[in-house]
Image (cartoon, grey):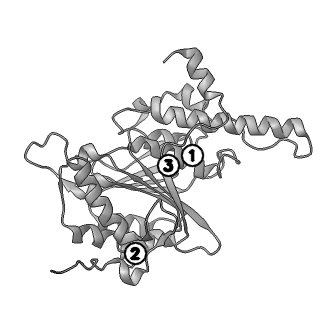
Amino acid sequence: MDEVLLRRLLDRPHAPSPGDSSFLSSLSEHNRAIEVAVIYHHRMAFYYWLCWTTNDWSCSLRSDQLAPDLVTVDWHDDVGGEPDCVFDELHSLIARLEVENVDDHASLRDAVQRRQMSENNVIAYSMLGLRSLNDGHIFPAQYLNAIGNVYVLYKQREKHSCRMTDQYGNQHEIHYVRTVRDLLKHLKKAESRPTYFDLDVDYFFREGRGKVRGAEVMIAEEEIRSLLDLDGDFMAHLGARPMRGMTIALEPTYCGGLIGCFKALSVICETLFEGSLLGDKVDWKDPRKSHKKPKTNQT
């Protein structure tokens, strides 16, 4: 892209967010709403994690304590590592976001400009700076301390849990597990901390005949409903940590195409939500109904 044009675009008051979202009530905290965002490419979740951790671009990233944890459910390992970080670029994404002097109009205008530029930087970086294969966006977010410890439920090649150090010197844990039982063991042993829930729809697929994309054939609907049942162990624990936001990545290429992706997404939405996600009226489903299969018309 032409450099002059890119600079002009980044200087616009508001760049469009990289996804769509709904605000729902918290599952465990009174008088709090949380955002559920739907994104096409998984790396766009990076934007939402930074947005939530900076309190909608009003507070700088904390240097003295870990950000909310991340629980990610994905067929693939999308954590990444140091090779996925261009540290000079990451350092320059977010300016200091606080207002220096609330009684000074120039200080207020300067803060607005810094916040706008920081948000636009992260939107552009989510699209152009992170790996286009959508498999290296978690480690950069950890490095910035936009997310704390990470728990990965996945199906790809086995990896061992490890630690990383963020830009402020804080130690973060990364735990890889292959079963929901092991994930719950890790979560229950750990400190109960605010958490973002990240769900890639392709987790609910398995390899097809071609085995080219890694995940092509949807698993049984009941397996999806069992994992996401709001009254089940996993979602009940996640909601109580408490959950502070949720990202849903579509990635239809790894779901056998749009038809498979939307079929799985419909099961996800029927299990989790009352009303239509991204519609006017939506909230979490009554847990007592979340595991039930919707009735179908009989002829």
Q: Relative to residue 107, is residue 48 drawn left or right? A: left
Q: Name the residue carrying label 2.
A: 230
- In 3D space, how far apart are the residues under numbered discs 1 and 2 (Cα atoms)? 26 Å
Which numbered dot is residue 255? Answer: none
Q: Residue furthest left?
A: 209
Residue 178: tell me if it is visible.
Answer: no
Among the 4 quarters of the image, the one containing residue 118: top right
- Judging depth in this view, the residue of 169 and 110 nearest the camera is 110
Question: CB under 8 Å between callouts 1 and 2?
Answer: no
In primary-sequence order, the first of circles 1 and 2 is 1
Mark 1 is surrounded, within 10 Å at the Cα level, by few (under 14), some (14 to 19) or many (20 or more) other residues, namely many
For the point 24% across and 45% down, the residue is 254
Q: Is residue 219 above or below residue 136?
A: below
Q: Relative to residue 288, is residue 155 drawn left or right? A: left
Q: Residue furthest bottom?
A: 288
Q: Name the residue carrying label 3.
A: 172
Residue 130: tell me if it is visible.
Answer: yes
Image coordinates for residue 55, horizontal then vertical, percent: 65, 52
- Judging depth in this view, the residue of 79 and 170 nearest the camera is 79
**Element under disc 2:** loop
Q: Name the residue carrying label 1.
A: 50
Image coordinates for residue 164, horizontal then vertical, percent: 47, 43
Question: CB under 8 Å between callouts 3 and 1?
Answer: no
